[in-house]
Image (spheres, rainbow, N blue to C red):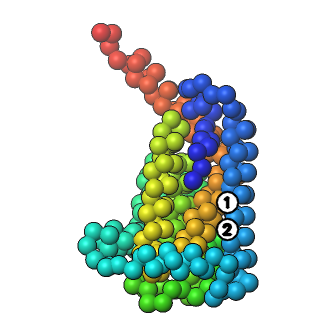
Amino acid sequence: MSTIPLDPPLEAGARMSTTTPGDRRNGALGLGITLLAAAAALALAVRRDVTRPPFQGLDDRWLSWMGGPHQGFPSAVAAALNWFGGPAGSVVPLALLLFLLLRRHWVSAGFLFTVYMAGNMLVVQGLKHLVDRPRPENPLVRVDHGSFPSGHAAGAALLVVIVGAILVPAARRRAWWIGGTVFTAAMMWSRTWLHAHWLSDTAAGAVAGAGAGLIAWWLCAPMLAREAGRRAERTRRHRRAAETDSPAG
């Protein structure tokens, strides 16, 4: 995941920085393109031979380590992550969308909806139909037609970037990226633990989701910054009005 904070101007002014917002935007764009290019390179490598890509040996070895027993705490964690990344887990982004709409954060709400839908429908499903890799034998959960890339891993990484862009204060984003990386890695592990994906499927999904999110953030950062600036200005006006109306102590 990226550690590049795309700060709105008002947030960036609250702390000293040796980089400009333009530098951070360009860095996010470069990282996003690099991650999407890595996902595309993996897709091309798999598409040449969907049953025996160059890294199939590593995938087989990792899957053998995921042999179980599939019970206890690891299985409970994997089941929870499977729920989170599946259709039922859409309640999480929908709840975030409702929160933004109730707060009248129209630009942020549009960013969340458009990027989350486009990332999953265009990037993930596009790669699935392009590659159409067979899944490991005997998956422990219900799965769809294509193993490459992991939609769960892609959705996790994409959601981490989206939430970091619109809800996490700039000063806390480094911690958010670290936690988001751990969450995405856990999602990757869960998909292989459940024999729903090969390890390379989850790696491709994670970089594709993060890359798509970063590029979308780069495109929309000026609009998000303007919305954040308007919110900050309204907050300052309300505080000044409250101070003016309050009796002198």
Q: How many labels were placed on the picture?
A: 2
Q: Position of residue 178 (x, y in %)?
A: 48, 48
Name the residue nearer the viewer: 123 or 49.
49
Res. 127 image quadrant:
bottom right
- Secondary structure of the residue carrying numbered label 1: helix
Q: Is residue 174 above or below residue 73?
A: above
Residue lying at the far left of the rendered structure: 72
Disc 1 packing (10 Å; few <14; some 14–19; many ≥20)? many
Q: For the residue marked with disc 2, what is the amino acid? A: Ala
Residue at 43% of width from left, 63% of height from top?
Answer: 186
Disc 2 packing (10 Å; few <14; some 14–19; many ≥20)? many
- Measured in 3D between alpha carbons, the distance from the residue under mark 1 to the one under mark 2, in whole angstroms, is 6 Å
From the viewer's perspective, tell me whether residue 244 is left or right of residue 120: left
Q: Is residue 62 visible?
A: yes
Q: Position of residue 51 (x, y in %)?
A: 63, 88
Res. 77 image quadrant:
bottom left
Q: Which part of the image, by quadrant, shows the C terminus?
A: top left
From the viewer's perspective, tell me whether residue 14 is left or right of residue 194: right
Q: Position of residue 176 (x, y in %)?
A: 48, 46
Q: For the residue marked with disc 1, what is the amino acid? A: Leu
Residue at 69% of width from left, 64% of height from top?
Answer: 38
From the viewer's perspective, tell me whether residue 123 is left or right of residue 61: right
CB-based contact (under 8 Å), mark 1 and mark 2: yes
Q: Is residue 125 visible?
A: no
Residue at 44% of width from left, 25% of height from top?
Answer: 239
Residue at image mark 1: 35
What's the mark number on residue 39?
2
